[in-house]
């Protein structure tokens, strides 16, 4: 799950060099919209609709706030995306209120489980893992095989050069916001039966997603999946040792530790990291 | 008198005028919010020093505020009476303990606020050094995320720790006897004196910072902000200066936490929340990054409006919108025109477009 948020971070970072602090809000937005839509339409329809709506929101955010800034500084971008995340959160609060919401399980129910060689797993976990794997594979194909994906990568490598080659860099940035919003929303939909969704559940997710993105090496989607698993396991173990209330603090402590020791991430190379801006 | 002290006089006159206005319009209850505003402003000016002059963003200053507030609240409400021992008897012989009745009429034996304040600030300094060392090596997103992470850890700690009151926070914190006859307390009879004490402290803090900015250290910080590598090449110990500024701003924040906790008589986990940290950064940004007076006047207006509840349930959203608008349209801040000429030169030499990059 964290890996999905992290991938969202990576897409925007790859295309623009911006860390989108509102990424967690996309996840919340996806979950919330799906819950609302699920009242009027069946689940298989509600989820794509929710993803589509969040994608549009992502595009609007890019067009309204990001597009016409020329060479913005890092600090400005950080503050703007934080401002955007506050706006989305407050809007969600006024639309949906403070109540905790959840989607029904896709198959089975919260108590049913599937026996996998002696281990009992909730069916929803399988959905999360399956869709997560699918997303990573699809992204890999998109970035390496399609023209559009290659253009996006070209923009991230060198925006001026890409522009000289006739690539519309502005549209690529919009597209990357849309893709990452869509992935975030999809993640929000598939995880929400397990973790529930609330208007303020975005920020902790964004931070964990960022932790995972750093852990795996910023910009590297495959490594993000591995790092997501590591964080998930560490978090589950932390409940044994420390009170549950500190669970949130654990992932952040890991984030800080990683930042201090090896900002390039455990799977990243120091060589590549030196080229990026810290 | 140096020209840089003119705004000090102007600001003092404004504060006196506000007090007189509330006196003659019989609306002294406004002074309560204005006093709280003053303590929040203490954080703002400290943060302004860090962001504007040293060029380092911190999204975790509510954490330092909470450290100050919680430590003093805990020490001044924790009853030592049921814990007789060598340390307690030593402490009581040295006269740093005070006995007072609690809310239910029972006996309380607690640490004196002065000692609690000292311990709180000391702890904040130690933590700021420990955190600041590795954190300030980072830049841009990483620095923002790391300080944000620090703030959230503090928030989670106070929220999850039983003896810090968990979600309820700590209440029944006694007043802070500053001098004989002057007590920092929310008592309405001491409203006027507290108003002046609070703003007096803020002005004192600003004067200190102004002197620092105009000293050799301040010029070195300006160099660090403008071009860190060049500053380093000139022999300025950039890492040490950044760290010391960080610690200094942490001291401001924790002192504000201590005093506001005594003034309010309690503290809750929301004071450590992420939104508080973001709000402080927002106010510094509106005031113009490297502009103490701008930050101070914006803090006066916005904190006061927010505390009076003018924004209603849109409180956080208002600050979010403000942040976005400022960053989109006026990254140098709204009040640039109102600057002193020398500060103005400083800002134009370091346009905010190069902030922390």
Image (spheres, coloured by chain):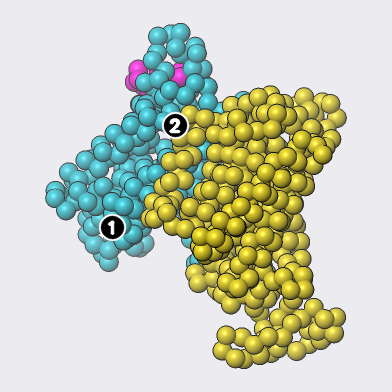
Q: Position of residue B80 (x, y in %)?
A: 71, 84
Q: Nearer the viewer, residue B157 or A92?
A: A92
Q: Which residues are drawn in magenta?
A: A141-155
* Residue A154: in magenta span: yes
Image mark for residue A102: 1
Looking at this view, is A191 or B225 the one in front? B225
For disc 2, the marked residue is A12
Q: Which chain is cyan?
A: A
Q: Badge 1: how crowded within 10 Å, few (<14), some, or many (20+)?
A: some
Tell me the subunit letter for badge 2.
Answer: A
Q: How far from the left and from the top, in percent, is residue B23?
A: 57, 62
Looking at this view, is A52 or A260 the one in front? A52
Q: Are marks 2 and 1 in contact (CB under 8 Å)?
A: no
Q: Quadrant of the C terminus of chain A?
A: top right
Classify A105 as above or below A14.
Answer: below
In this rendering, does residue A151 appear at all? yes
Q: Is residue A24 above or below residue A193?
A: above
Does any portion of residue A116 appear in the rendered image?
Answer: no
Crowd rating for badge 2 (residues with CA inside 10 Å; few <14, some 14–19, many 20+): many
Camera-side residue of B335 and A232? B335
* Rendered view: A93 above or below A65: below
Mark 2 vs 1, N-terminal side: 2
Chain under numbered label 1:
A
Q: Residue at (33%, 31%) from the top-left corner? A: A59
């Amino acid at each position: 799950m964290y890996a999905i948020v992290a991938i969202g971070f990576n897409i925007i970072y790859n295309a623009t060099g911006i860390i989108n602090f509102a990424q967690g809000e996309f996840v919340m937005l996806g979950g919330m919209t799906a819950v609302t839509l699920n009242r009027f339409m069946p689940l298989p329809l509600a989820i794509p609709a929710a993803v589509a709506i969040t994608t549009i929101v992502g595009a609007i955010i890019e067009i309204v706030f990001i597009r016409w800034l020329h060479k913005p500084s890092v600090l400005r971008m950080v503050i703007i995306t934080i401002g955007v995340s506050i706006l989305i959160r407050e809007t969600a609060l006024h639309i949906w209120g403070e109540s905790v919401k959840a989607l029904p399980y896709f198959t089975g129910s919260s108590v049913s489980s599937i026996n996998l060689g002696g281990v009992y797993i909730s069916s929803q976990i399988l959905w999360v893992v399956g869709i997560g794997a699918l997303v990573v594979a699809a992204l890999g194909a998109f970035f390496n095989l399609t023209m559009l994906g290659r253009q996006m990568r070209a923009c991230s490598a060198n925006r001026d050069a890409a522009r000289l080659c006739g690539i519309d860099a502005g549209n690529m940035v919009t597209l990357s916001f849309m893709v990452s919003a869509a992935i975030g929303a999809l993640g929000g939909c598939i995880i929400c039966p397990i973790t529930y969704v609330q208007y303020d559940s975005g920020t902790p997710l964004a931070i964990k997603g960022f932790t995972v993105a750093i852990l795996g090496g910023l910009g590297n989607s495959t490594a993000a999946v591995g790092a997501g698993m590591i964080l998930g396991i560490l978090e589950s173990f932390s409940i044994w040792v420390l009170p549950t209330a500190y669970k949130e603090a654990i992932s952040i402590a890991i984030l800080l530790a990683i930042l201090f020791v090896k900002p390039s991430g455990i799977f990243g190379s120091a060589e590549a990291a030196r080229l990026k801006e810290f | 008198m140096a020209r840089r002290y003119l705004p000090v006089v102007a600001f003092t006159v404004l504060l006196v005028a506000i007090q007189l206005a509330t006196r003659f319009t019989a609306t002294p209850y406004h002074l309560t919010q204005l006093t709280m505003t003053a303590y929040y402003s203490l954080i703002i000016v400290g943060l302004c020093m860090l962001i504007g002059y040293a060029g380092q963003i911190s999204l975790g200053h509510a954490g330092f505020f909470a450290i100050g507030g919680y430590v003093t609240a805990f020490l001044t409400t924790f009853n030592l009476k049921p814990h007789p021992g060598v340390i307690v008897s030593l402490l009581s012989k040295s006269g740093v303990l005070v006995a007072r009745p609690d809310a239910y009429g029972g006996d309380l034996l607690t640490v004196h606020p002065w000692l609690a304040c000292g311990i709180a600030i000391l702890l904040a300094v130690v933590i700021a050094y420990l955190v600041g060392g590795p954190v300030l090596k980072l830049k841009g997103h990483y620095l923002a995320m790391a300080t944000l992470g620090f703030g959230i850890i503090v928030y989670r700690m106070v929220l999850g720790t039983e003896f810090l009151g968990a979600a309820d926070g700590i209440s029944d914190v006694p007043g802070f006897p500053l001098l004989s006859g002057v007590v920092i307390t929310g008592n309405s009879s001491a409203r006027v004196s507290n108003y002046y004490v609070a703003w007096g402290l803020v002005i004192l803090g600003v004067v200190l910072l102004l002197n620092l900015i105009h000293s050799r250290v301040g010029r070195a910080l300006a160099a660090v902000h403008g071009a860190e590598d060049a500053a380093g090449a000139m022999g300025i110990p950039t890492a040490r200066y950044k760290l010391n500024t960080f610690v200094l701003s942490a001291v401001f924040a924790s002192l504000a936490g201590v005093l506001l906790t005594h003034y309010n008589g309690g503290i809750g986990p929301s004071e450590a929340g992420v939104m508080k940290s973001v709000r402080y950064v927002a106010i510094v940004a509106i005031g113009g990054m490297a502009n103490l007076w701008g930050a101070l006047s914006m803090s006066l207006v916005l904190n006061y409006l927010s505390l009076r509840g003018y924004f209603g349930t849109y409180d956080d959203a208002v600050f979010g919108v403000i942040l976005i608008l400022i960053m989109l349209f006026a990254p140098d801040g709204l009040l640039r025109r109102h600057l002193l000429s020398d500060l103005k030169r400083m800002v134009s030499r370091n346009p905010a477009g190069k902030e922390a990059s």
